[in-house]
Image (cartoon, grey):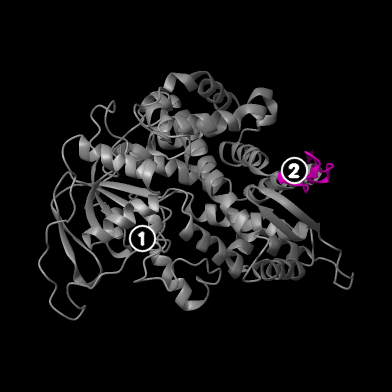
Amino acid sequence: MLPTFSPAASASAKPPPPRPIPGSYGPPLLGALRDRLDYFWFQSQDEFFQRRAAANKSTVFRTNIPPTFPFFVGVDPRVVAVVDAAAFTALFDNTLVDKRDILIGPYNPGPGFTGGTRVGVYLDTEEPEHERVKNFAMALLHRSTQSWPVLLRAGVDAMLDSLEADLAKPASSNGGDEKPPSANYIVALQQCIFRFLCKAFVGADPSVDWLVDRFGFTILDVWLALQILPTQKIGLIQPLEELLIHSFPLPSFLIWPGYYLLYRFVEEHGAEAVEFAEREHGIAKKDAINNLLFVLGFNAFGGFSVFLPFLVAKIGDPADPSGLRPRLRDEVRAVMNRAGNDDAVFGFGAARNEMPLVRSTVYEMLRMKPPVPLQFGRARKDFVLRSHGGAAFQVAKGEVLCGYQPLAMRDPEVFDRPEEFVPERFLGEEGRALLQHLFWSNGPETEQPAAGNKQCAAKEVVVDTACMLVAELFRRYDDFEVEGTSFTKLVKRQPAPSNLPSATPAATAAAQS
C-alpha cells in the first residue's frame, strides 16, 4: 500500500515554498546497479517504489530505473519517481513535459523494431508529424465503429467454441491422480484479439494468409518481448535473467522476417487504410504501414493481451467473495431482455449506457492492473511539482519524471479501501467523480484523446471492448470459473421461458447502437 505522510501544510494554509526532491541516485554505476537488482531481483515493482517512498517520507523522490549498466550506452537511469495521484497529473501537462522518445523510459528500443519509422507514440506533441499520425489513428477507429461490435462477437464466439471443446476433452491423469478438466485461454484469446483487430482496425482479414493467421499473434508476442524485456521482470532463475535479459539491448534483426511478413500483409490486404493515410493525412506509405503495425501490435494487441486475462480471471474467481458474477449476469441479461432478442449484438451504446456495473468493474480492473504501469515525461523547463497537502518540489529542466500508476491509482488520499478490488467503486455521482484519478490511458478518464495530447486514441474503445467481452461471456454462460489462466467451469445459458415478446426492429437496433 502507498504510505501516507503528514502534509507539510493544510489546504487552507499558505502553500510552503518548493523543496528539493528527496532521495539519492547513489555512487556512479554502483547506485544504478543496486537499484536495478532491487527492481528485478530482490523486490517486486510495488515494493521497489513503496520502500523508497517510505524511506524518503515522500511520494516524490529520486531513484534509478532499469535498464542500466553495463551495456546500455547513452541510457541515463536517473528519474524523479511519482507515486501519488496529485503529482501524477503533471505527466499529462504538455506545457511541462516532453514525451519525445520516452515511451518505456530513458531506454528507447529504437526504430529498428518499427521498420525505420519513428512511430507516433515516440513523437512529442510539438512535432508536426504527431498531429498527422494521431488524427489518422482516431479516424481509423471512428471508421470502424459499425463493424467493431459485430467482428468482436464473431471472434469471441469462435474462441469460446474452441475453449468449450478443450474443456470437454477427457481429464488427464498424472501418476494415477486425475486432473480436473480445464481449458487455458491465453493462446485462444490472443488469436481472437489478433484476428479481430486486423479486421476491425486495419481492414485486413488474416484468413487470406495462412502464415499470418496461424503465427501472426506469435510474431507480435516476440516483437513486443524483444522491445520491453530489458525493462521487465520475467521470473527466470537469477542471475541468469540479469545476465541474459537485463544487461544489454535485444537486437531487432531477430524479428525482421516476422515483421516483414506482417508488413507485406498490411501493405497488400490493408491497402485501403494505407491509402487513406496517404490521401487524407499526408503520411507516406512506409510510415503509414509501420504506424498501423505499431498501433495494432503494441497499443492494441499488447494492451489487450495484458489486461483482458486479468479481467477474466478476476470475474471468474471461484470464490467470488462479493457475489459479482450473478450481478453482472443479471445486468447483461436485463439488456438482452430489453432488446427482446438474445442474439442482438452488444454495441457501444449498451457498453456505455446500459451496463453500469460491468463498466465500473472494467474501470476497477484498469485501476488495479493498468496495462502500462509506468508513464514517463522529460521536463521542458524548471517547474514546481505539487502533491497532496500543499507539498511542492522543484523539478529542473531535462529531468525525467517516472510515474508508477499502480501506486498512484491506489492513493489512500483519493480512494477508499485502495488495496481492495471494489467492482462498484465507479458507480453513481461519487464514483464518476473518481474517474478523474483513473490514469491508465496516459490521461484522466474524464478527458478525451486529441491530436494535441498523448492520451490513448482508443481510450473509449478499450473500455467498451472489455465491457462487450464480459457481456458476451454472460450471454453465453450462466456461470463460469477461472483458475490461473484456465477456464475450469463453463455453464451454458439455459433458455428462459418463451414469454418475451418477439424482437422489434427498433429494440434490436437499440442493442446494436
330, above or below 261, in the image:
below
Badge 2 amino acid? Ala
Query: Disc 2 designates what residue?
Result: 158
Q: Which numbered disc flags the more N-terminal residue, 1 or 2?
A: 2
Q: Residues within 10 Å of mark 2 (few under 14, many from 20)?
A: few
In this view of the protein, which residue sits in the foreground, 84 or 129? 84
Which is more toward the observer, 119 or 328?
A: 328
Question: Which part of the image, by quadrant, shows the N terminus?
Answer: bottom left
Q: Quadrant of the C terminus?
A: bottom right
Looking at this rendering, what residue extends furthest in the left direction?
17
Residue 255: x and y in percent read: 49, 22
Q: Over which residues does the magenta segment extend?
A: 167-183
Q: What's the CA distance linking mark 1 and mark 2?
A: 38 Å
At 77% across and 57% down in the image, what residue appears? 476
Element under disc 2:
helix
Which residue ends up furthest to the front in the rendered image? 175
The residue wearing badge 1 is 408
Q: The disc labelled 1 sits on which kind of residue?
A: Ala
Residue that appears at 63% across and 54% down = 312
Labels 1 & 2 near each other (Cβ < 8 A): no
